């Protein structure tokens, strides 16, 4: 680790401790205790999609190791979660990481584009499943309100997928 990275990590840890202290450490610990072991189980369960996506990246990154793919995915997800760059910073960081590990720039960009597209399709499938489960369990909601909310959610989803397809066909991700 470079000297600048060590200083940045130290500053980040100190800032994190400062934020915890300013919010009241006892309140944070009480909230975590209220969540209990379920919070740890949720965090561990999150490793499943992370590992699956890393395995997919490894397949696309011919000759790369699972460790490199897992670290690339982890770094990308961290960037998406921590930085105010929307969901753009993570894929850029993942591609950059793969390039630093020996992948050609066009191949890294293509691998991360395919990975991001497949993630989006997975999220769409889960969203549609959620809409279907909502419809099946929403007996306390009037039928017209349920139909309207399902149509709005499905329409917005179709608009997103259509816009994504249109942008890809127009060459938005071309070199």
Image (cartoon, rainbow, N blue to C red):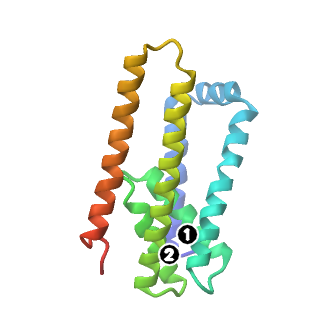
* Crowd tier of the residue under label 1, counting other residues whose Cα lies within 10 Å: few below 14, some 14–19, many 20 or above: many
Q: Which of the two discs, 2 and 1, labels the residue nearer the N terminus?
A: 1
Q: Image point 39% across, 25% down: which residue?
A: 147
Q: Which residue is mark 1?
A: 72
Q: Secondary structure at mark 2?
A: helix
How many numbered circles does the render carry? 2
Q: Image point 62% across, 26% down: which residue?
A: 31
7 is higher (above) or lower (below) than 141 = below
Estimate the x, y position of residue 126 in percent, counting from the top left.
54, 44
Q: Secondary structure at mark 1?
A: helix
Examine the image and state in which quarter residue 69 appears: bottom right
Q: Image point 49% across, 41% down: which residue?
A: 128
Q: Is residue 85 visible?
A: no
**Where does the N terminus fall, quadrant-wise?**
bottom right
- The residue lying toward the viewer, choosing from 71 and 1, is 71
74 is higher (above) or lower (below) than 69 = above
- The residue lying toward the viewer, choosing from 56 and 36, is 56
Q: Which residue is mark 2?
A: 97
144 is higher (above) or lower (below) than 33 = above
Examine the image and state in which quarter residue 150 appears: top left
* Crowd tier of the residue under label 2, counting other residues whose Cα lies within 10 Å: few below 14, some 14–19, many 20 or above: many
Residue 147 horizontal side relative to residue 39, left or right: left
Estimate the x, y position of residue 122 in percent, counting from the top left.
53, 53
């Amino acid at each position: 680790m470079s000297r600048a990275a060590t200083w940045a990590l130290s500053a980040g840890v100190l800032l994190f401790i400062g934020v915890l202290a300013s919010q009241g450490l006892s309140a944070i610990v009480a909230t975590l205790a209220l969540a209990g072991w379920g919070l740890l189980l949720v965090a561990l369960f999150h490793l499943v999609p992370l590992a699956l996506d890393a395995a997919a990246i490894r397949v696309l990154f011919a000759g790369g190791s699972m460790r490199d793919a897992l670290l690339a995915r982890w770094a990308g997800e961290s960037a998406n979660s921590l930085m105010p760059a929307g969901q753009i910073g993570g894929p850029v960081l993942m591609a950059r990481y793969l390039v630093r590990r020996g992948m050609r720039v066009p191949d890294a960009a293509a691998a991360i584009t395919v990975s991001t597209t497949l993630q989006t399709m997975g999220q769409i499938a889960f969203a549609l499943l959620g809409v279907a489960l909502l419809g099946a369990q929403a007996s306390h909601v009037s039928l017209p309100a349920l139909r309207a909310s399902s149509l709005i959610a499905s329409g917005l989803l179709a608009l997103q997928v259509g816009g994504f397809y249109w942008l890809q066909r127009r060459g938005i991700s071309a070199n």
